[in-house]
Amino acid sequence: MAQHRHIQPGSGRASGGGRPDATHYLAVIGDLRGSRQLPDRRAVQERLRSALELLDRRFSGDLAAGFAITTGDEFQALLTSPAVGLEVVVACEEALEGLDLRYGLGWGTLATRLEPTAVGMDGPCFHAAREAIDGAKETGRWLGARGFGAEADQVLDGVLGLIGAVRQEWTELQARAVAMRRRVETQREIARRLSVDPSTVSKRLKSALYDEVVAAEQAAAHLLDRFGAEAAARAGAWPA
């Protein structure tokens, strides 16, 4: 996806302490829907914990506060750049394939001090993420974004909603092929791992609109970065 532009170079994760942070962050909230009706909820929660630990390691350079499970089957994290937000959500979707999740992205500041993990904090970024995920749940979308400005939020919801509509039509085989294509360079290698013909992999990716989805994701990452910069500049967080 897009190159990641850190808002505060070298900030990384906080060790706790200090004054409330005025920097802009991207809060990510995810919610596992219907988990209490699953036959083995304990196994699902263990899978969720393992997935979040994996995301912590993979995105360690982009996290201001690590992933944490909060209430029920909800989890959240704090990112230093809006550009990486969609990539994190997609990685979470792939790590928890087969489960029904909703997400909210919220851009803004913190009203409390920055903590090592995303618990015990509050502020506009989390409020915006909460509004985004609540809106996604109400409209049946997989992902929403708030805090970038009314017009920007609307544009982002449109782009993210279109990506979600395509993803929703994927079969399990298509989703697996797409996830593997993100990690593996050649379709031939994917075919070898799946013990199928390369033409089968090609057909699955084509019918999943893989190239179009990746292009849309890159465009969404660019918009998140651009709108984030504009919103932060309006707030006086960055020089205009």
Image: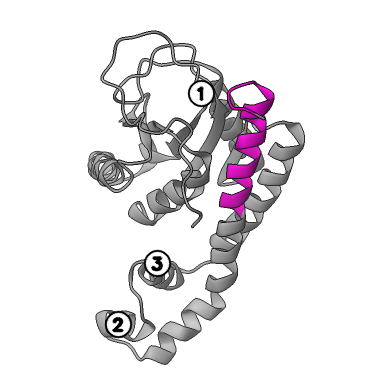
Q: Quadrant of residue 9?
A: top left
* Front-lying residue, 104 or 66: 66
> Would residue 235 be found to the left or right of residue 40 on screen?
right
Q: Is residue 228 magenta?
A: yes
Residue ID for mark 2: 189
User: From where the camera sits, is residue 209 visible?
Assistant: no
Q: Residue at x 71, y 39 (%)?
A: 152
* Percent of width and height locating residue 96: 35, 51
Give the SS element for disc 3: helix
Q: Which residue: 50% across, 42% down?
A: 102
Main secondary structure found in the magenta portion: helix
Span shown in magenta? 220-239
Q: Residue at x 50, y 17 (%)?
A: 22
* Mark 3 and mark 2: Cα distance apart in space: 12 Å
Extreme residue in the right direction: 151
Q: Amino acid at mark 3?
A: Arg
